[in-house]
Amino acid sequence: MRLINRLSVMATVVSTIFLASCAGDVYDPSKEPQAPPAENPFGEGFAAPDGFGWTMITPVKLNIEVKDDFNGQYKYLVEVFTTNPLHDKNATPIAAGVTNGNTSYITEINVPTAIEKLYIRQTDPKQRKEVYARTVPENGGSMNFKLYYTGVDTRATGNTGSAFEAAKRAGFIEPSHKDSEDIKPLYDETKIIPEVPAVSDGYVQYNPGALNAGAKFIIGTEYTDDVPFKDNIRVHESSGRATVFVQGVWDLSASGKKLASRLDIYVMNGGKIIGSKDITIDAQNTLTIQSGGSVESQGGIFYLGCPAKIYGSINATNVKVNIGTPEIYIGENGSIKATETGYFNSAQVFNYGVLSAGKLEFIKTTVLNKSYIENCEDILINGSQIFNYGDVKFNGTLATNNNTGTASFINHYQATLAGSTWNNGASVYNDGLVQLTDFYNTAVGEIYNSCAFIIRNEFTFVNLILDNGSITSDWSQTANEWLPVPTITCNQKVDVKMRNSSIIKADNFILGNAPNNIVGEQGEISMIKIRQLTLKNNGKTSISGNLVFEREDTNEYRQLDVTCATTGYDESKHSIESCSGIINGGNEGGDPSDPEFPIIVEDATNYTFAFEDNWPTYGDFDLNDIVATIDKVTFAQHEDGSVGTYTLNGTLQAVGASKKLGLGIQFLGFAASNVVELKGIVEGVTSNSTPLGFEANQSNPVIIICNDAHRFIGNSENDRSYVNTLANNSNNKNGAKFEISIEFRKGAVQPKDLNINQLDVFIISKEASSKIKRTEIHVAGYAPTDLGNTKLFGQGNDKSSAEAKCYYLSSENLAWGIVIPTEFAWPLEYKNIKNVYTNFVSWVTSGGKEYKDWYTVHNGQVFKE
């Protein structure tokens, strides 16, 4: 072993009582034999901070409660993982136990400091599993888990009212229209349309081109399609009005008539206004069309600039309403049908009949639809509010031409919006049915859904509230279920609230431009059910609250923070029911039963112990003099929580020293008197019939794995050649396996007694003589065994002190060994660890706060098999 004036690297897993750094340098030059200090291999003046315990493992106390659906009749199985078992199929629990509503599952564990989350899997008596993730406190401590939602639990109120009422309670402001109640009685046709007067009732003979104020003029039935009435009409007096009754045919196309007078026009049953060019009835007029009456305008534009009550029909190539807030009322049997464009600007439209157009445009218009808006290719609702209590159907695109968020579509109870593509810029409030091929709302606008969104292709959104609402694709008769939306996506920051048994169901859920926040709120649990999740940037996406998150894929995203219940696809026990019925039936599970005992816990965390052998003076700190791993720990747990059989599998991986070294394990958590049987494979000798014994004259149980590490790993006797520390060396070998199996008395030993911090792996650098105890080297904070030599305390670079409970730390607060909670590629011979692992020094000097995963980045100068 050659000494190099370089990095002093020492790290260890320590129990909580040993974490504090030692105080004061207790080196006493009068002690014998003397070991003078060596130069600091880190460099002069280098020291670890006071209080740094060199630990890469955090102690955590867990208190876990379940929501017991079986009134304490059965036990729930609770398992603790450091990786998500839904995504890591090889994940094994580091702890497990049982509980129900009467008791909590309480235990103590140790987790690597680089681990940010613990995953708790609950298996209920029907064998249904849910996983919950929680963040590990930075310095460990206590963690209290409630494996259920703890917020206010209010029941869903059903779908008997308006989504708008719920939306207003959530803080949304309802755009106003003329009357929030049914306005139909205000426009009773029998009360609105007067009878056609007789001559004696004030009939005024038509004077071509003009009527006197107060005149009532009849275009009689003698005017037909073949011989229509063709004149324009005006009123003589500038402030007067006249009334025109159309019983026959009035042709306004000959001169492109513009009715600019003050006429109250009634198109009676059988009467009609026709035109083949542009026709204008401007704002000074009124127009009422009786049932059976009509306006027929083909070939031009019918400009309707005045208030209109339509109980009959308007059929035109184009209809344009383009004055300030006219009221357009369409009665039960009435209709406005434009083969090309229906354009409404700054109007109020009350539809109890049929409104249709090739392209229907609403600009700053309020629409109350109680019946049908149909046969439209495209609908534009720029700056408009649509209140739908009936059916709105279109074949192309429903859109806005700006992204100001001023437009809104309110789809009330039992109403339907059906079509191809919704595109941009408007808010949607729905407690009816929205059925579209694509929904794109990529910039502004709120979505409040308390019933059904059925999307056949893609749903894109920004802000979304679901209140007993669902987002799915169509119902499948063959699969007998609501299908998932093929793609749900958003490239903006997402804010989603889900409450009262709501659900999002998708094949592919794509999120970008985080932070994104999806939260489940009050009422019965809601659900996100997806096959594939894609996060397109590094921002945080949070999914939390009263939710269950079902996923089929196993992608693990560091930027994804899920704290609600999670399950595999179709594995959740929860049934989700909205206005469309049961959207998710839930996993019914099997017959209820208790977990089978013993419970087998298998902690497959690989712990690597790496030592320098020159204590009490510094060495070269390549940390490969002895490298040993604990590869797996397995134990069987009784129903009372105590451990039955315990098995430890380990490997001596490398020997980078030229002197004889030994390897041992001191168990700190149990007494030898609690052991029923000890057996295993140690130093190549199999012992199956005769139990192996613990070392004599020890207060704690101690097992010596080997007295000669070179021999144990495969060298011949007295061959001190390095093994597995030089690249491409002919002496390199497979590591030497060892296994220890211990059977305990029932009830005597708890899982916490076997935590890694209760396992003291040490090396022996000098065997005992008749006068001097053996020289042991432990990780920082661990005391030597009863057979270890303490006379070297305070010599060389060491400042150990039994009185101060300070062990195996140097005067610069450095240590002679580390334990890394993973598979570790140790440095090659003569390679200082600070040069090989470039983040190591920063980890040390920060007191372990920075680069907690320093052991994941190296320069390649490590041993590789």
Image: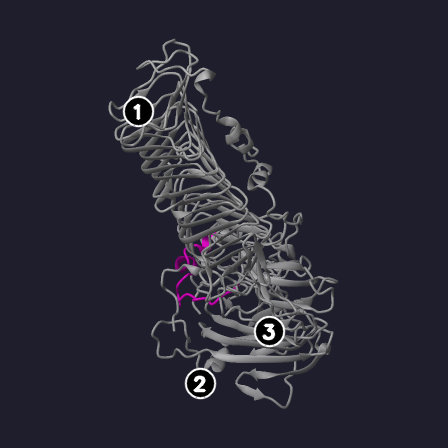
Kindly identify which residue carries mark 3. Answer: 665
Residue at image point 56% right, 82% down: 682
Q: Which amino acid does the dot numbered 1 rest on?
A: Phe
Q: Which amino acid does the dot numbered 3 rest on?
A: Ile
What colouring style does the render use?
one colour
* Range covered by the magenta-colored residues: 819-842
**145 and 678: which is toward the camera:** 145
Kindly identify which residue carries mark 1. Answer: 229
Q: Which amino acid does the dot numbered 2 rest on?
A: Ser
Which quadrant: the N terminus?
A: bottom left
**597 and 386: which is toward the camera:** 386
Query: Taking the image as drawn, is residue 846 in sight?
Result: no
| x then y, percent, for residue 763 | 55, 72
Which quadrant: the C terminus?
A: bottom left
**563 and 267: which is toward the camera:** 267
| Marks 1 and 3, the one that precedes in the sequence | 1
The answer to which quarter of the image holds residue 223 is top left
CA gap between label 1 and label 3 equals: 114 Å
Q: Residue furthest front?
A: 200
Kindly identify which residue carries mark 2. Answer: 716
Query: Taking the image as drawn, is residue 82 in sight?
Result: yes
For the residues carrying marks 1 and 3, which lies nearer the camera in this image?
1
